[in-house]
Image (cartoon, coloured by chain):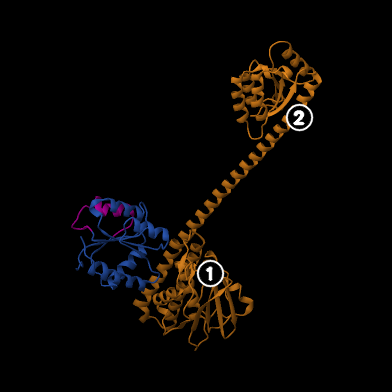
Chain colours: A orange, B blue
Amino acid sequence: MNQSLDTCLTVLVLTPSGNDSLNAMTVLRDAGMQPVHCANLTEACDHIVQGAGALLIAEEAFTSAETGHLMKTLAEQEPWSDIPIVLITAGEDITQAGLEKLQIVAPAGNVTLLERPLRPSTLVSSLRVALRSRRRQYQIRDLLEQQQQSRNELEKRVEERTAQLTETIAELEAFSYSVSHDLRTPLRAMQGYSEFLWEDYSARLDDTGKDYLRKILQASGRLDHLVQDILTYSRLSRGEWELKDIRLQKLLTDVIESYPMLQPSNIDIVGEFPLLSVRGHEGSLTQVFSNLLTNALKFVPDGRKPRVKIRTELADGQVRLWFEDNGIGIAPAYWERIFKMFEKAPGEKQYDGTGMGLAIVRKAVERMGGRVGVESTVGQGSKFWIELPRAHEQ
Amino acid sequence: MNNNHGTILLVEDNDNDVVFMQRALKNADLLNPLQVVNDGEQAIDYLTGRGTFSDRTKFPAPILVFLDLKLPTKSGLEILRWLRESPEFKTLVVLVLTTSNEPKDIESALKLGANAYLVKPSMFSELTELMKATKAFWLNFNHFV
C-alpha cells in the first residue's frame, strides 16, 4: 500500500543543529509545509526510501563519507521518482571538502543550489517548486500503478479465456472421439448382420426382400462414410501440422496406386508432367487428392468414361494445381457453396456422396495456408484448383 | 512356421463384435481355439491364470491376443503397458483391434509395444479379409518365441 500523498510530501530537513536548522523548520512550518528534522544523512535516506517530498540539506551537515550513501539511495529510486534536493551552500566561505561534496552530489540528483546568506522567501519558494514537481511525480506513480493494474486484469482475463477455450477444445475432441466409437459400433452391427442375412438367408428371400436388404446395406454404408467424413473434417481442425516440401508427382502416383477404384479401367488420370512441388502436410494432401480424384470418378454422366487432367502453374508466386474433369459440371451459383459442409449441387442427388468431400478439401488446403476454387461448364466438366505455397526446393 | 493350434485370446466387450470375430475367423479358416474375455480385469486374470482361469488345460496361455482399446475396468492401453512390463508377456503377440483411428491412440498403442494396430472395418466382409491376412502373416509366416 502506498503512503498518502500528504506523508509523501514532507520536507526532510538536514541542517546543522543550531540556529540555521531551527530557523528552516520554523520558516517551512509557517509556510504551511511539513518539515521533518533528520539527525543525519542516513536517517534522511531512510525517509527517502519510505517516501518524502523534498530534501533540504546544508552542505556542512553531512560528511564526504555519507555522500556515497545518498548517491546509492538516489540511484535506487523507482523509475518515476527523482526526489528534489535543495542544497544550501556555505557561500563564499566554502571549504575545499565542501566543494568536493557539491561536485559529487549536485550533478547526480535533481538539485537546486541556494547560496548563503539565505532569505526565508527564497527558501520557501524553492521548496514550493520542489514539492510541486514532486507531486507530479507521485501522480505519475499512481497512473503507472493503474496501468499495471489494468494490464494485470487483462492478463488474468486472457488466461481465463484461454482456459475456457482449452476446455471447449478438449470437450470437442472427446465428442468426436465418442462419435467415432459410439456411433460406428451399432452401425457396424447393422452392416454385419445385414451381411449375415444376405449370406445365410438371401436364397429364401424373394426379389422384394432382397431389394430391401440391399437398401439397408447401402444406407448403412452411406452413414458409415458420413461419420468417417465428419471425423476426418474435425481431425483437420486440430493438432499441429509439420509442413514440408512435397513432390506432387510422387504423391499422385502413390494415391493412384493405393486406391483400387482409381485404376485405368475406371478412370483416365493424365498428369501433365513435370508437376511443381509444394509446401504442405503429406497426409492431408493425400486426402485432398483422393477426394478430388474420387469426385472426378463419381460425377460423370452415364456412358462417359471419367477422365481427369492434372497440371500445375505458378500464380503470384504460389503453385496452382488443377484437376480438370469431364464430369457433369457445376452451375456458377454453386461454385462457392459446394465447398461448404453438407452442400450439394443440384443433380448431385443421384450420385453417392456425403456432402463433406469438398469441405474436407477446403479445410485441409486452408490449414496448409492455401486456397481452393472451381470453374466449370455444366455438362462438359469442372476445373477444380488448389493453391499452395511453393516448396522451398523445387 | 505353422501355429494352427495355439490359443488366441480375444479381449472384446461388445457381444456383436465377438460374434463377428468368431465368424470372420471361421471364414478365414483360422481355426485356432478362441477364448474371449469381456473386460480388462478378466484379460489380466486370464493371462496370469488366476481365479476362474486357473485351469491351464481349459484356459491355455495364448500365443496371440486381439486387444480392443475401449474396455470396462481396465483400458486396452493399460493392459498393453502391464503386458510389456511383465517379463513373461514382453514378447506376446498383441494386435490392437479397435474402432478408433485417432492418431493419438495409434501412437500410444505402438509406443507401448503393440505388434500391430488394426481398425475394425465397417463391413463384415472386410473383417474376413483382415483375418485372412492375419492368419497368413502372424500364424503362418511369423516366428514365435
Q: Earlier in the sequence, mark 2 or mark 1?
A: 2
Q: Nearer the viewer, mark 2 or mark 1?
A: 2
What number is the disc on residue A388? Answer: 1
Determine the image quadrant of residue B7: bottom left
- Pick the residue in front: A198 or B27: B27
Residue located farthest toward the top when viewing the structure as drawn:
A18
Q: Amino acid at mark 1?
A: Leu
Query: Magenta stretch containing residue B58, yes or no?
Result: yes
- Pick the residue in front: A367 or A91: A91
Can residue A226 be seen at all in this image of the molecule?
A: no
Residue located farthest toward the right when viewing the structure as drawn:
A121
Q: Position of residue A26 (x, y in %)?
A: 76, 15
What number is the disc on residue A132? Answer: 2
**Residue numbers of the magenta segment:** B36-61
From this view, report whether residue A208 is shown above or below residue B51: below
Query: Magenta stretch containing residue A195, yes or no?
Result: no
Q: How far apart are the alpha carbons under marks 2 and 1?
A: 64 Å
- Pick the residue in front: A277 or B102: A277
What number is the disc on residue A83? Answer: none
Q: Chain of mark 2?
A: A
Q: Chain of mark 1?
A: A
Q: Position of residue A373 (x, y in %)?
A: 58, 74
Q: Amino acid at mark 2?
A: Arg
Question: Dot 2, how many residues are within 10 Å of its Cα: few (below 14), some (14-19), or many (20+)?
Answer: some
